[in-house]
């Protein structure tokens, strides 16, 4: 599932290849990924418009033009690809933005989210309303305030996009494992030292994952061990625990993430 590092990578694709490029046409192979806009409306609104520098907030990618903005959400299986003009279509290429230099393609197998068009900042703000601060921008003091009154399990709090935008299942588990915090701990029960450790590991994991373009399945990371046949902690070798927390499969080490 695309999380903040993946979407930051998609932002890089858009920034490197499409910024300054003007849309000649929009080819919609599957309107099932369009949200609140028809294929015809999307094409009419973007034809002749040029992409500006993209931004990201959490798992959302905002692609401004000199007209409306295109907002991408990648759901479970979405991605953004840059290809040469006329390159063969992938079966999951749902929308293609054709420019003079190449084609920007929104590719998605499951179509759980998709593409929204925002005419002006007010519409953009309405689409993004309710999101918490971007996980990469959260300060230690801000994290303290966020967690102070939260009764829920810390894992559920971290993946709630209304609380902090951008963290998904893999990132949350990795961060908690590195910080030595059990995922079922009530968020408000964390000590000042644990909150500092959580913030430190959140920033470190995000930066490393952004450099890798994903949450990397390295042998030294929890992410690299969680899906093995006999998953064990990369630090101590203890068998990893697994349960549903916040509706997501959660993995942790019972040794150094004691409840």
Image (cartoon, rainbow, N blue to C red):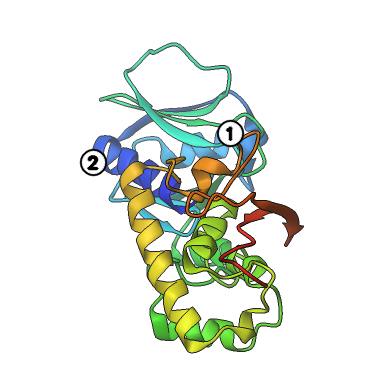
Does residue 206 lie above or below 90 as drawn? below
Residue 71's tag is none
Give the structural element (helix, strand or loop) at label 1.
Answer: helix
Residue 75 picture location, percent across and down: 60, 44
Q: Is residue 224 left or right of residue 23?
A: right
Q: Earlier in the sequence, mark 2 or mark 1?
A: 2
Residue at numbered disc 2: 20
Q: Quadrant of the C terminus?
A: bottom right
Does residue 228 lie above or below 152 as drawn? above
- Residue drawn at 63 percent across, 72 percent down: 154
Q: Is residue 179 left or right of residue 154?
A: left
- Residue drawn at 76 percent across, 56 percent down: 244
Residue 39's tag is 1
Does residue 18 lie above or below 153 as drawn? above
Residue 66 picture location, percent across and down: 32, 50
- Residue drawn at 42 percent across, 80 percent down: 196
Disc nearest the viewer among 2 and 1? 2
Question: Toward which corner of the image does residue 147 lie, by quadrant?
Answer: bottom right
Towards the viewer: 112 or 251: 251
Towards the viewer: 222 or 63: 222
Query: Can residue 249 be seen at all in this image of the molecule?
Result: no
What's the distance in space between the residues labelled 2 and 1, CA to CA? Answer: 23 Å
């Amino acid at each position: 599932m695309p999380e903040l590092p993946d979407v930051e990578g998609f932002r890089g694709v858009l920034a490197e290849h499409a910024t300054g490029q003007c849309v000649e046409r929009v080819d919609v192979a599957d309107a099932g990924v369009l949200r609140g806009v028809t294929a015809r409306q999307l094409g009419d609104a973007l034809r002749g418009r040029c992409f500006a520098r993209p931004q990201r907030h959490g798992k959302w990618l905002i692609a401004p033009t000199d007209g409306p903005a295109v907002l991408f959400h990648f759901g479970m299986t979405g991605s953004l690809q840059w290809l040469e003009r006329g390159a063969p279509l992938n079966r999951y290429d749902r929308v293609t933005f054709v420019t003079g230099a190449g084609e920007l393609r929104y590719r998605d197998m499951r179509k759980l989210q998709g593409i929204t068009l925002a005419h002006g900042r007010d519409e953009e703000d309405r689409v993004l309303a309710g999101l918490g601060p971007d996980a990469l921008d959260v300060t230690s003091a801000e994290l303290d305030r966020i967690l102070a009154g939260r009764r829920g399990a810390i894992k559920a709090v971290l993946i709630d996009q209304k609380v902090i935008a951008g963290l998904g299942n893999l990132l949350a588990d990795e961060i908690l494992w590195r910080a030595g915090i059990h995922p079922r701990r009530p968020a408000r029960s964390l000590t000042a030292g644990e909150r500092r450790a959580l913030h430190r590991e959140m920033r470190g994991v995000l930066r490393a994952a952004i450099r890798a373009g994903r949450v990397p399945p390295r042998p030294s990371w929890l992410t690299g061990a969680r899906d093995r046949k006999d998953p064990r902690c990369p630090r101590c070798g203890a068998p990893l625990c697994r349960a549903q927390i916040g509706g997501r499969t959660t993995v942790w080490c019972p040794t150094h993430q004691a409840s």
